Image: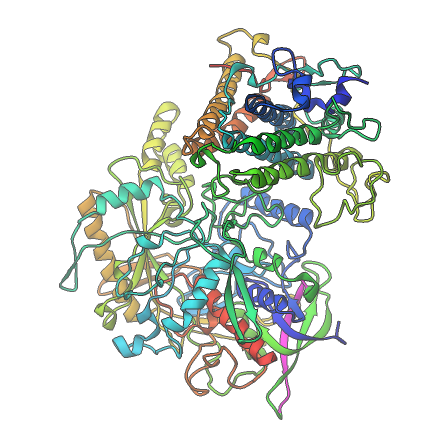
Amino acid sequence: METNQLISGIRHRLVRSGEPTLTDFNKITTLDSLRKHLQVAIELEHSTIPPYLFALYSIRENTNEVAARIIKGVVMEEMLHMILACNILNAVDGRPDISHPGFIPEYPTYLPHSNQSFEVNLQKFSRPAIETFLKIEKPSGKGAPPEADRYASIGQFYEAILDGMERLQAKGNIFTGKASRQITPEQFYGGGGGVVVVHDLASAHEAIAEIVGQGEGIDGTIEDSDHLLFGEEVEYAHYFRFNEIHEERYYRPTDTPKSGPTGAKLPVAWDQVHPVKENIKMKDFKKGTEEWGMMYQFNKSYCDMLRALHDTVNGDKEKLREAVIMMYDLKYQALGLMNIPIGNGLHAAPSFEYVK
Amino acid sequence: MENKEYDVVIVGSGIAGAIVAKTLTQAGKQVLLLEAGLEAGMAFDTDGAYKNYQEYLRSYYLALAKVPNAPYPDVKDAESPNVLDMTQINGKPDTKGYFVQNGPLPFASDYARAAGGTTLHWLGTCLRMLPNDFKMHTEYGQAVDWPIDYEYLKPYYEMAEREIGVSCDVQEQHYPNMGGDFFGKDYVFPMYKIPQSYIDKHFIEGLNGLKVSLNGDVYVPWCTSTPQGRNSTPNEKYRYAGTGWNATKKKLEMQPFPKRSEVYEPVGAIWDPYAGQRCEGNASCVPICPVQAKYNALKTLKSAKKEHLTLMSQTVATEIQIDSSTGNITGVAYKQYPQADSKEYVSGIAKGKIYVLAANAIENAKLLLASDACKTSDQVGRNLMDHMVLLTWGLMKEKVFPFRGPGSTTNIPTFRDGSFRKQHAAWISPIDNWGWGWPTGSPDTDLDHAVSTLNLFGNDLKNYLGDLLSRQLLLHFECEQLPEKSNRVTISKKYLDNIGNYRPVIDYNVSDYTKKAFKASKSVSDQIFAGMGVQDFTSYPSNEPDYTTYDGQGYVFRGAGHVVGTHCMGTTAKNSVVNRDQQAWDHKNLFLVGAGNMATLGTSNPTLTLAALSFAAAENVLKALK
């Protein structure tokens, strides 16, 4: 009952010892605490990207197009959320840190203090992987009412941030960050929605609405909402998009969360996937082997990209262009790895580990 | 379907038809759009559009010859011309492909009969025409003047640049005789320029200050970045949200963003607005942009008001029906085929108050001829034009790495206008970014030569190709062709397609006016190559389809895919097919749109101009509907 309802979903696994404790989150009363919360928000938004990318890359080219597109869309939105969180932190004159060694979680990651013991693996595109993604994205249901000292969902976590900002702003202006540190809509693209430049309470609201709206969708009403959730014009929350893959069916405009998707068949070829080793690590191979070298190179590229993004959100905006080029390289490097047999019918894969 | 009368029936879903459909539906009109090709992304179904486009990509990857139509289905019931079908014509008509080519030279361009039209495989160059292009007769004693001028078209150019989403830095645009107010004060494009490619930077450096003599005059050619219909970084100074019909003033207007904080948002792929928001430099623009960062007309179609738009695909217009007493059009007869390549079809008649033909210059002409329409001037099908492209190629001294970025990002505009147009054609010189692919079939042919003839392998092979392919430079000299009555499209009962529709019969040749420009541009190329130390590999073999000679020299030209003329705009019912409103002189409720209306060609790729004209036509249709 406990932690996984305090903050629903794996997104919150980064809340662990050494980082702000949950009670610190209850009410944000100092600017320092606000900034720490925002740093955690950035890490939360990033933490799902490696498992989603791992599954996405594992799909064989020219197969599972719809599923690949759904996963890709979600990844892009997580990247947008991360940048939005950076903009909020920069607006309150904080310093986003997205290149420190602990920034990438170590997979598999168990939910800390979880009683259900579901873990997040770096695993290939498969039913179990999609089931994990559903758990990650599922907002808490009615069984977890918001309590005064707990966060029932990521939505509440961001509400606490807003609440804190409002309270602190009432005492004196907290939006003292330099405007030049903001990532602007012209700069950022491809990320499922617009970047919001944050410079006051209203724009901070707007940014958080964008994050919470896409991620959680209809928080707390997932099983029994009568809102219009589906159809062409509706941007589905991540949970429902993954559920379409899981059920191998599209939602129809008349569907409800309870009914599940009842529309046309969504073709999924579960076997059109590279047979990659899950939760692979560099230490599985001897230094100097081809596999080790390619894994190192991938990790180097991933960390270099994080470092370029770090510079981007810390005033050096020209670095974004470099980061984008590195993102392209990552895909090719991952595909290269996934073509290397390593014995037992398995292939190599990217490990998403921190390297200098 | 036959019972319903629409406000407007449009034939063709390319950029012209799509712009008219979007503008009219957004103004509340009921529109029926007929498309001869497969549905293919026309519908508002995201997954369908995505899957369909992936099929196109697969066809492209598998095609041995990556020609413009390689990715797109060639449906027998609505065939498309293909440049691979072109051969030398020796006395009798060449009927191998969709075109029947009477010659003496083959017409060298193609187009796509598919949803979205030829914008599926256009390069994306978006140059406006120059003021003098509209008055060739007055200025240079050549061809004809248009009934409209540059000033007339200017506001519509802005609408077209918004619709296509043009990336360009306005302050870099310098053309000959452009006048002081070519773009208007404070005008900016929706997006900043696409970064110029690596090869261009080297070329620009090499060309800088080089003197070239031509006809006794000395020129210092210069380069400009090329405006392009592909997505780049939005320009925050750009202020227009779109184009709309002002019913009170009875005109189309650019509408500013409601909020100051809003910025232009690049229009992404039709299956995902967040894909293709920037050009990724895939370098396969022609024939296909894998992410749809390059504009295509399906994007415009997608933003039409769908409740007011009825789409019928696989529906080939065969004849427009004319009320002989009034001259008014009463319907468009069509054949709808249930399956691709089927010999079966269902006939029907589409009815509207006004009819708009937007089926491409050659297809429009064919349809008019098949209907005995617009006969007064005897100009239908005549004045077929294209840019005649002379290519020159060589090896740069150092590695310049072609294929980085889109197909072409820079051009030499120096010879786009000047008093030399009294004697010979003007031209524009784009710098190509695709090695020698077009003239020689490189890199495949270079690899073949290295292995089979030079017997290279291993590191020697790698080094040889690494050096050769990285230094390849290709220049285009896209020479203007004037309107000539004998370059024409006709039809004949002898030549019918799979479902009994006419195939275009084409008579085509090159005049001395353009041949002189081949000679002049080749001499400019020689001087540039010599000045920059480029080793020239240009050759014009006499067995090429479009081989011609002038002044004792042989030249080979290629088509630019710029299919223009055939129902020209003019000042009287005697000298032209449509008036300045793009309305047929002979049939009041018939509007013709597309590059077929262009009276002369100039040196711009025609898509931007035809898009601007289509906005003007849409405005005139709305006025006519009251």
The answer to which image quadrant residue B540 occupies is bottom left
Residue A341 in the magenta stretch? The answer is: no
Residue B82 x/y as whole percent: 51, 58
Q: Identify which residue is drawn at 67% across, 59% down.
A: B341
Please, is residue A218 above or below residue A38 in the view?
A: below
Q: Which residues are magenta?
A: B312-324
- Between B321 and B84, the one nearer to me in the picture: B321
| The furthest residue to the left | B216
Residue B297 x/y as whole percent: 55, 58
* The N terminus of chain A lies in quadrant: top right
Residue B314 in the magenta stretch? The answer is: yes
- Between B546 and A48, the one nearer to me in the picture: A48
The answer to which image quadrant residue B486 occupies is bottom left
Please, is residue B457 above or below residue A251 in the view?
A: above
Looking at the magenta stretch, what is its main secondary structure?
strand
Residue B112: in sight, yes or no?
no
Coloring basis for residues: rainbow
- Between B478 and A77, the one nearer to me in the picture: A77
Q: Is residue B86 left or right of residue B112?
A: left
